[in-house]
């Protein structure tokens, strides 16, 4: 490196390359994305937010909720599942024997006999009954066909796998680029001090719940470490007509630390209401081409 | 000025030309460092006592955390590094600083920008993009100030007599370009009226974050270390050939890291980043080894002096960046993503690596440019021990806690609350470390502050003296300290060239 120009050139080329890769490339590839279709439906995805929910994103941004919460679900893979839905004329015990004989005789199924038998062990006939879950779809298709032939109804499903998905209510599939199409700024977050919120609108769709949680997280989760956002609420003397927006705190025998003094009510500010509207708009429940899963019954 | 005169330019004159700009840059930087650490502690209090700021929006975690992080990077690391760069360039050029008034103005612009940015975040006007939270007004100020300082630095660099560049030149010069381009791009796209739609925003954000926190800090920190280590050890840099290799691999590979493996973006982006991260192991080791070889066997009394700072900084450079790189390893990322681990690594890079080297450099430079001893030399030593112990106590619990939290988050049968609770006890230790770092930063601030005061008092005395003399004798001119004609013959240190 003899001259400043050489250094300049090296740095220019190096940073220029990554600029093309990580700024220009994504702008061209993702910046022009448009909404997609929800699988097996005519609905469009993502749904554009309206009114309060749109403003709520700005409240979320301004208060830095993303410092503690992510809005992205990860998935490690996908599994094919087969469940028994209706046994028709059969009894649980003879169906078990029938399946065991299939697993013992059909060559393609032999590899899976342990897995299926394990699922059926101790089964007394409760429905629906998951009999196979795994990467392979031969079992699902073949066994499903064979059972259909004898009048047993089964359901084949594709499900996303991974810890995020397994946590009930966090979401049913991974987050993909198109989910964020209408978010600005995109609030992905990078720390899970609190739960992921990508699907909070499905998990807790009740506005009053959201408001109460914001006002006093501990009133809902007793050992919550989420800070209360009391500054988004005002404590008001109840006037001639009580405010229609006032928080409906759960009725308790004794007033506790969260209940306002008698004659007072807790009224959410406009910001709090917008934030709650935004939260219930967060959903991760539509199957997409990029992230497929089977949402509804596809019984054979 | 003829060439004979030019050669006789002595370090004193160079130092004097840097005095005011460096005071402006370092003084502000030290103040922001203290405020940033204090705000960081305030933010962490939310975890020790969640409802502490329930009625006080400004200090709630989401506000304080972002403001604190930005203060460490934009408030402290960047202006301090710029100050050191100016001085190193002047020294290497054997010439006084070019346009010394420009960096003084720029430093003030910069600090106003940081102030505006911080207040905006606390009031809820953050842009919502990590590491780019400052709203437009503030970032325009920062950008303009940076450009001005860069102009002064590059002009000074152009004054050098020896055409050949020293390795520190490459690193520090590249750092100037790096910031302008990446910060400019990110602001242009994200902090404008029509940002791109959707997740591209996050991708650009990650690109910027990596280019600042990993590449920029590495360029600046290593560039500074490569200037001071040979001087302190009294040996030439262990091969500028290797340094060139380290430099090129750093800029060519390092810039591709940054996209998290779990990111909801097309798969090629995280994959490229994983490769970039893998390759970035090379410069991290290469540069670390060069530093090690340079000081190997040198008998330098160190006890808390600048050498200690810089050596600790280079060790942190290797450790912190290897942990950083591990975040982008697909397997490890499944555990580490979304945990405290990332925050711990970033703080290590910012404080343990860049912060350490910068403090060491400031303590080395200040007595020279001010032409007086540090007012509290003992506190400077204490600063080292507080910083070293504090950063480790600050970040290591975050790393361990992050891994434990990540293991628990991976298991859907463990309730979420348990995964958070496990991190909590580590956070308590971590905050103690943060407190120690804050005390260390106070030592720095006190030294700079008192030095500035002493200097101003000295100036006042001289001025009063001159006025008095002229009244009494009617005679005019008496040289001020640091004036060219007062240039002492004493040449404090020869440049150690490879």
Image (cartoon, coloured by chain):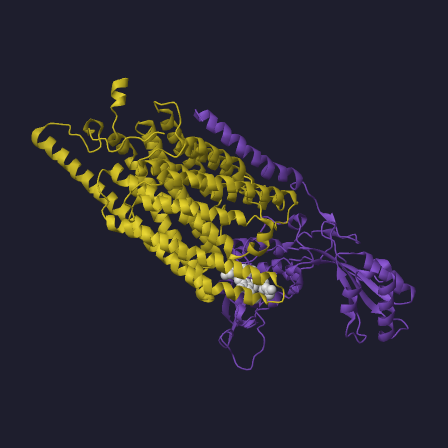
Chain colours: A purple, B yellow
Quick check: A65 above or below B191? below
Percent of width and height locating residue B218: 45, 41
Percent of width and height locating residue B296: 36, 41
Quick check: B406 above or below B461? below
Percent of width and height locating residue A47: 69, 53
For image coordinates 28% across by 30% down, the residue present is: B494
For image coordinates 45% across by 33% down, the residue present is: B242
Q: Nearer the viewer, residue A151 or A47?
A: A151
Q: Nearer the viewer, residue A179 or B255?
A: B255
Outermost residue, left side: B472
Give the quadrant of residue A219: bottom right
Percent of width and height locating residue A248: 59, 72
Outermost residue, bottom side: A253
Give the quadrant of residue B78: top left
Q: Is residue B123 visible?
A: no
- What is the count of numbered marks? 0
For image coordinates 30% across by 28% down, the residue present is: B96
Q: Nearer the viewer, residue A278 or B52?
A: B52
Outermost residue, top side: B2
The quadrant of the rendering that contains the C terminus of chain A is: bottom right
Query: Seen in the image, is A266 located left or right of residue B438?
Result: right
Q: Nearer the viewer, residue B82 or B473?
A: B82
The quadrant of the rendering that contains the N terminus of chain A is: top left
Q: Is residue A146 visible?
A: yes
């Amino acid at each position: 490196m003899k001259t400043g120009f050489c250094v300049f050139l090296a740095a220019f080329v190096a940073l220029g390359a990554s600029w093309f890769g990580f700024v220009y490339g994504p702008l061209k590839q993702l910046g022009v994305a448009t909404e997609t279709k929800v699988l097996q439906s005519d609905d469009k995805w993502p749904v554009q937010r309206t009114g309060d929910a749109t403003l709520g994103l700005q409240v979320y941004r301004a208060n830095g909720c993303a410092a503690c919460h992510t809005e992205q679900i990860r998935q490690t893979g996908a599994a094919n599942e087969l469940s028994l839905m209706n046994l028709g004329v059969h009894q649980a015990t003879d169906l078990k024997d029938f399946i065991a004989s299939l697993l013992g005789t059909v060559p393609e199924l032999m590899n899976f006999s342990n897995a299926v038998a394990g699922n059926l062990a101790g089964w007394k006939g409760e429905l629906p009954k998951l009999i196979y879950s795994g990467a392979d779809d031969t079992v699902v298709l073949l066994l499903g066909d064979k059972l259909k032939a004898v009048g047993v109804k089964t359901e084949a499903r594709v499900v996303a796998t991974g810890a995020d998905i397994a946590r009930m209510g966090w979401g049913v599939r991974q987050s993909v680029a198109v989910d964020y199409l209408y978010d600005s700024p995109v609030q992905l977050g990078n720390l899970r001090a609190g739960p992921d919120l990508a699907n909070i609108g499905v998990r807790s769709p009740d506005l009053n719940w959201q408001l109460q949680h914001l006002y006093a997280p501990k009133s809902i989760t007793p050992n919550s470490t989420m800070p209360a956002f009391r500054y988004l609420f005002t404590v008001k003397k109840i006037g001639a007509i009580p405010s229609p927006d006032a928080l409906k705190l759960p009725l308790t025998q004794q007033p506790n630390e969260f209940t306002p003094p008698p004659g007072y009510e807790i009224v959410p500010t406009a910001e709090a209401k917008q934030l709650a509207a935004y939260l219930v708009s967060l959903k991760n429940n539509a199957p997409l081409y990029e992230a497929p899963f089977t949402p509804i019954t596809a019984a054979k | 000025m003829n060439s004979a005169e030019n050669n006789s330019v002595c370090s004193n004159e160079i130092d004097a030309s840097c005095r005011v700009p460096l005071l402006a840059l370092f003084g502000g930087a030290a103040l922001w460092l203290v405020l940033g650490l204090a705000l960081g502690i305030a933010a962490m209090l939310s975890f020790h006592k969640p409802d502490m700021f329930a009625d006080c929006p400004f200090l709630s975690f989401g506000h304080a955390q972002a403001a604190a992080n930005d203060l460490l990077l934009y408030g402290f690391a960047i202006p301090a590094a710029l100050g050191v760069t100016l001085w190193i360039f002047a020294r290497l050029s054997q010439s006084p600083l070019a346009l010394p008034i420009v960096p003084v103005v720029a430093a003030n612009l910069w600090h106003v920008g940081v102030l505006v940015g911080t207040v905006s975040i606390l009031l809820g006007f953050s842009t919502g993009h990590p590491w780019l939270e400052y709203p437009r007004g503030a970032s325009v100020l920062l950008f303009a100030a940076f450009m001005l300082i860069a102009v002064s630095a590059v002009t000074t660099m152009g004054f050098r007599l020896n055409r050949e560049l020293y390795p520190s030149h490459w690193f520090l010069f590249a750092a100037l370009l790096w910031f302008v381009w990446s910060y400019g791009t990110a602001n242009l796209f994200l902090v404008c009226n029509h940002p791109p739609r959707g997740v591209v925003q996050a991708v650009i954000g990650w690109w910027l974050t990596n280019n600042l926190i990993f590449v920029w800090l590495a360029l600046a920190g290593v560039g500074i270390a490569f200037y001071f280590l040979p001087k302190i050890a009294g040996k030439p840099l262990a091969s500028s050939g290797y340094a060139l290799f380290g430099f090129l691999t750093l800029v060519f590979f390092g810039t591709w890291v940054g996209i998290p493996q779990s990111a909801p973006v097309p798969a090629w982006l995280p994959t490229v980043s994983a490769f970039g991260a893998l390759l970035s192991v090379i410069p991290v080791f290469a540069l670390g080894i060069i530093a090690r070889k340079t000081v190997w066997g040198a008998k330098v009394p160190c006890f808390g002096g600048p050498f200690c700072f810089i050596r600790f900084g280079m060790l942190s450079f290797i450790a912190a960046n290897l942990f950083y790189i591990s975040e982008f390893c697909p397997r490890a990322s499944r555990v580490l993503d979304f945990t405290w681990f990332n925050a711990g690594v970033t703080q290590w890079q910012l404080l343990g690596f860049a912060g350490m080297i910068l403090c060491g450099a400031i303590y080395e430079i200040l007595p020279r440019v001010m032409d007086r001893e540090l007012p509290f030399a003992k506190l400077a030593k204490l600063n080292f021990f507080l910083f070293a112990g504090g950063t480790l106590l600050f970040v290591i619990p975050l790393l361990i806690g992050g891994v434990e939290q990540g293991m628990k988050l991976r298991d859907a049968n463990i309730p979420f609350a348990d995964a958070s609770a496990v991190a909590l006890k580590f956070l308590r230790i971590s905050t103690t470390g943060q407190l120690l770092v804050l005390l260390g930063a106070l030592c720095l601030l006190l030294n700079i502050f008192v030095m500035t005061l002493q200097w101003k008092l000295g100036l006042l005395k001289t001025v009063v003296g001159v006025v008095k003399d002229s009244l009494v004798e009617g005679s005019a001119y008496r040289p001020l300290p640091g004036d060219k004609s007062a240039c002492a013959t004493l040449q404090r240190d020869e440049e150690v060239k490879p």
